[in-house]
Amino acid sequence: MKLASAVVNSFGCSASGERLVSAARDGDFQEAQALLEYNPRLARYSTFGVRNSPLHYSAAHGHHEIVELLLQSGVDINLRNYRGQTALMQACQQGHWEVVLILVLFGANVHKADYLNGGTALHLAASNGHSRCIRLLLADYIPSMPNFRDIMSKVTGDEESISEFDHRALSQIINQPADGGITALHMAALNGQVESVQLLLEFGASVSEVTVGDGTVIDLIGAGSTALHYAACGGNAKCCQILIARGASLTTENENGWTPLMVARSWHKGWLEDILSTEPIDRPKLTPSHYLSLPLMSIVQIAREYGWSSKSAPGCQDPCVVCLERKCAVAAEGCDHEFCTRCALYLCCTNRGTTFARGPPGSVSCSLCRNGIVSFVKLPVKVPIAKEIARTSLSLPICQCSQETPSKPTPLATQLRSHELCRAHDTPLGVSFCCLRLPSIIACRKTPDICHS
Ligand SMILES: [Zn+2]
Ligand SMILES: [Zn+2]
């Protein structure tokens, strides 16, 4: 009897699991939500042969709301499929940056390598030219500070860490080799992904890393090849120029004895002859990448700590002027314009370039005043009623009964008071509550004598 019931349960679970897989693949949020409410354990369901889990399907198809739903249901964020791929890798491969954002906010492991060729999410994003995904993957490694580019331009590679941030950790992740020593820069260069090559170089990708002949990959270019050898094979002139501007050598020979020019010739990329033949007299100065987005680390940290999608925020702040839905929770440093956390996150992810930003390269243009934002700060919890009192200038300056409360309340007292007053505002009983809190003020206006005494 027990066995029969187990079999029935197993079939039932399997049928529901398949329905969840379909919902995750097709983006049917309502269905996925209903199934998970019915049986939260379905989040851990995987298809026959561990092909893919619902998380993989929703990530690969860009359904970020379902990805968030599954993660909230307790699914393992770093779950692998039979190829060793995580949901983060699949989202990066397809360029679904909103999914990557959610996965990064939930703390997905960006270092995991797949079983096929040891490639990471960064390799997949780079080889497909998904620069927004690259930027998000590095959110925890690029500090939100105005002089980041200046510091990076002075880095020689020997430093373990620079006073402001851990340079070695950044260097490790950006130059992490897949099988055969292939870095993300090699992949972006081979596939002619100009913007990704530029972004990786900004973040310290090394132009001198070479591939190795470890027999794990079929290497038609040859072991010992630099990213410039790969760019020469790919045939994108702009990629070659950017790499050369960043110091890539024209004379490095790989283990076949080939220079980048010889690679270009053997792959019939005749248009690269001039670029790869002679060293430029003056290495051209690189323009900053459009995807630097310096404030990203600051807003990701705030979002992780305080949440990013709630429509309410503690302290009854003003509504966000961008979405008009959620309450402001963060302010841009510099211009002090306020946004909800989600809009600030999207601003950092979608902003392209620094053309209009009045700030250092990599700053993000404020939607309201075009100030260049380098970082966001969490808004302090406001006390709306205090503002109200200040605006209407009740008889506080005259009235001595304000001594009832300490002139400098402790943070805890402020929080408690703001919570009380806020709650009063949010309920129909708010007015009467205010009267209760401020009876002496009202009395004071009428009979100041009583109050002073
Ligand atoms: Zn907003
Ligand atoms: Zn502004």
Image: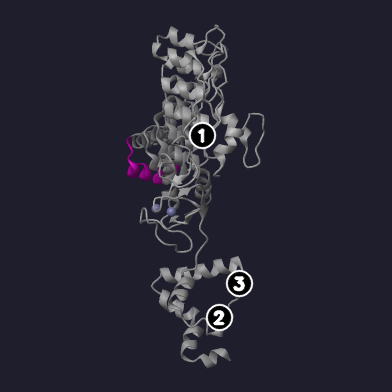
Looking at the picture, how far across and down is residue 73, in whole percent? 46, 44
- The residue identified by callout 2 is 402
- The residue identified by callout 1 is 78
Q: Quick one: label 1 or label 3, which is nearer the N terminus?
A: 1
Q: Quick one: label 2 or label 1, which is nearer the N terminus?
A: 1
Q: Which is in the foreground here, disc 2 or disc 1?
A: 2
Q: Is residue 54 above or below residue 413?
A: above
Q: Is residue 436 above or below residue 99?
A: below
Looking at the picture, how far across and down is residue 411, in whole percent? 59, 66
Q: Nearer the viewer, residue 408 or 205?
A: 205
Q: CA distance from mark 1 to mark 3?
A: 48 Å
Query: Which residue is at a point 59% across and 66% down the rendered structure image?
Result: 412
Element type at mark 3? loop
Residue range in magenta is 26-40
Q: Residues within 10 Å of mark 1 (few under 14, many from 20)?
A: some
Looking at the picture, how far across and down is residue 268, in whole percent? 40, 9
Q: Residues within 10 Å of mark 2 (few under 14, many from 20)?
A: some
Q: Amino acid at mark 1?
A: Asn
Element type at mark 2? helix
Q: Which mark is residue 290?
A: none
Q: Quadrant of the N terminus?
A: top left
Q: Nearer the viewer, residue 406 or 424?
A: 406
On the image, which quarter does residue 346 sit in?
top left
Residue 319 makes an appearance in the image: yes
Q: CA distance from mark 2 to mark 1?
A: 55 Å
